[in-house]
Structures are given as structure tokens and as C-alpha cells.
Amino acid sequence: MNDEWLTVAQTADGTDGPRPARNQPEPPEQLPDQPDRAQQPDQPQQPDQARRRKRRGPGPFTLLVLPALVTVTGVAAFLALGGLPDPWTDDSDANASAGADIDPSYVPWLRKAASACTVLEPSVLAAQIDQLSGWSDDSDELSGQKGIAAFTDSEWRTWGKDDDGNGHASPRDPADAIMALGRRDCSLAKKVTELRTEGRVNGDLVELTLAAYAAGPAAVTEAGRVPAEAETYLDEVQALLPRYEALDREDSGGAGGPAGALLTAPVSPLTITSPFGSREHPLTGVTKLHTGVDFAAPQGAQVVAARRGRVVFAALTSAYGNRIVIDHGTIQGKRVETTYSHLSSLGVAVGRSVEAGAPIGRVGSTGLSTGPHLHFEVILDGYYTDPRPWVVPNGV
């Protein structure tokens, strides 16, 4: 632990169905062999009969065989040049559902539900629903759970709404059920975030949220982590996550830092006065993990966001003083959050979206601090990590 309390940092293959084959011309009808006129005996004709004979029309070969051959040749050439434009145009929702055996119409609702809070990803909601119901909207008569998200009547009265605007809120309506599950999960995510901010629990926020869903927030609080009774549910959901990763829209931009660094320097210049690692606390004398890096900076110096993200915490704490936490989403497959502590003032509020380099506060010495500086942390998938390789090229 660092010189302060541990606090939050805020993350069946299917196809579109077989495409109907394009119509191919049927092979030409085989005609019976025609007798050779040259072998037929000559019939005597009168000159006037020959003159009065009507002109013969096209024969069977001309009417049937020749057009078929022309058609086959034309189609083959047309397809060789690219053929008709594909009617199955590139659609992000359909593509996202291609790696998972779900209805593509569910994808926008999964993304909308997950966007309500920074902890959730669409893949998490999808894996939950898969674990709960296997995407079946049948009712469980024994438990009373209904719909793909397995809501009971009492749970639905708390979380259910008519989200798709069809005039009826029902747990058997997939859109309503997905959005209700998102609201429920986001409420749990908020609770476990507060618990981790207060230093009462530790662990990845997604795992803590799923554990709270399975066992309740009280069980998570009592255990201080994922409780044993939630581990089976958590393992089952996590085993399903890879199936739905295509649903997630990863944040791959917004760093704005120097070449080789993924994060922008939160203050300038970068002068490290206390590195990440075990140290003796300058005020308490206790040796423990220093969970971030202290950057020297004068009182009131500008502090900026290290990367594009969303503010998930901005308040005064007893140890960190004025503290800001920004969730940056997923970077290189890991959920990344940054924290900025001991600030003299807060320039952003919870819920605010910020860009890399955007001002968020001022350097100070609030909380347990010996003087003005910025205590900066990087939290990777719920665990503190050395910020230097993230901010400074080559970890210098």
C-alpha cells in the first residue's frame, strides 16, 4: 500500500446465416437427335409449290440452345469481373455479432446499456446473459426468473423500464431486459467503486461488480474482495467473455504523449521525487508500497489528463487530499485508469469526458503530504503498476 488509502481507479461462432446462392442458368434442355436431311430421300416438288412455300422460322437450336449458351457465357464473364454488389453490406452490428451466436439487433442495446457506466463493456453484459439464460426467454417456474436476463417480478419492478418505447416494459422483451441488466450492473459498479475508493475492498472493478451481482454488495464488503460464494458465477461468466469480445469498441487513441509513451505527462517537466515501490512513509514512518510516482511541481501548477477518458472520481479524501480518477477504457487489451492526488483544486467533475492534455486541476499539498507535488498512479486491470513505462519513453 502507499502512503494513502487504496482508492478507486476507474472496464458459438455464428454467421448472418447462409446466403442464398445466386441464381445460375439451368443447363439447356437436351433435344433429341435430328435426322440428317442429307440422308432423307429427295421428294419431288413442283416449281410453283417451291415458290409458294413459306419461309421457315428459326429451328430448335436457335431458339433454345444458342440463347442458353450465350447466357452462360455472359454470366460467367460478369461474375469474373466482380458480379453484383454484395447485398450483405458491411454493418458494424452484424459484424460484431458474427463471433457470437446472438441476434444482431441486440448489439446496439448491449452497447447502449454498457455505456451507462465506465466499468461495463458490452461483452460483460452478453456473457452474463449467456450464463443466466443461454439467450433463451423462457421462464423458470421454480425461481420465477423471466426473460434472457432472468429477472424476478420484484427485481423487474426495481430495474425494468420500457426502453424500446413499444408501450410495454417486460423482462421478456430483449431490449428492455438488456437495458435493465445494465442499470442493475452499473448500480452495483458504483457501490463497489465507492468501497474500493474507501479502501474497504480490493480487486478488479468488473470482477467485484459481477461478484456483487452474484452474492450481494454486503458479501463483497465483508470479504474485502470477491467472496467465495461468487467465484463459480464469476468463473462461468469470464469463460464466456472471449465469445463476445467483438462487441467491445476499444479505445485505441487519444494518447498524445511522446513517441514510445502511451500516456501524456500529467505535469511538465517530469521530475520524479519518489518512485513507485516499497518505501518508508515520510510522515508515518511505516514501510509499505508507494503505489504511484511523485512528480515535483510548484503549488498551483497545471495538471492535465494523461489520456482521453472519463472522470469517475473527483473529491476530497483524507489521505490523498483532492483526488481525480480517470477511466481510459481498454488499451492493449487491459483496462487502464490514472489517478491525480494532493491537488489544490479540482477542475473537473464526475462524468466529464476529457481529452489527453486537457486541464483537470492544480498541484497542491492536500491530504497526507509533505509539500506541493503530484502523486500520479496508473492502475492496470485493478492493480497498481509503475507509471514510468507508461508516461516516459523507455521507462527513463
Image (tube, rainbow, N blue to C red):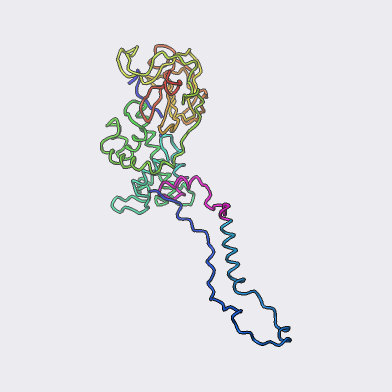
Residue for point 33% across, 50% down: 145
Tally the numbered discs: 0
- From the top left corner, tell me how far across and down residue 117 is, in percent: 43, 36
Which region shows up in magenta?
78-107
Position above or below: 355 against 74: above
Let me know if residue 88 is in the magenta part: yes
- Left/right placement of residue 210 relative to residue 176 reads left
| Front-most of residues 246 and 60 | 60
Residue for point 30% across, 31% down: 225
Q: Where is residue 71, by image quadrant?
A: bottom right
Let me know if residue 68 is in the magenta part: no
The quadrant the C terminus occupies is top left
Q: Where is residue 376, by image quadrant?
A: top left
- Left/right placement of residue 330 relative to residue 152 reads right
- From the top left corner, tell me how far across and down residue 101 is, in percent: 40, 49
- Left/right placement of residue 181 relative to residue 225 reads right
- From the top left corner, tell me how far across and down residue 69 is, in percent: 58, 65
- From the top left corner, tell me how far across and down residue 272 is, in percent: 42, 14
Residue for point 45% across, 18% down: 343
Position above or below: 55 against 96: below
The quadrant the N terminus occupies is top left
Position above or below: 336 against 138: above
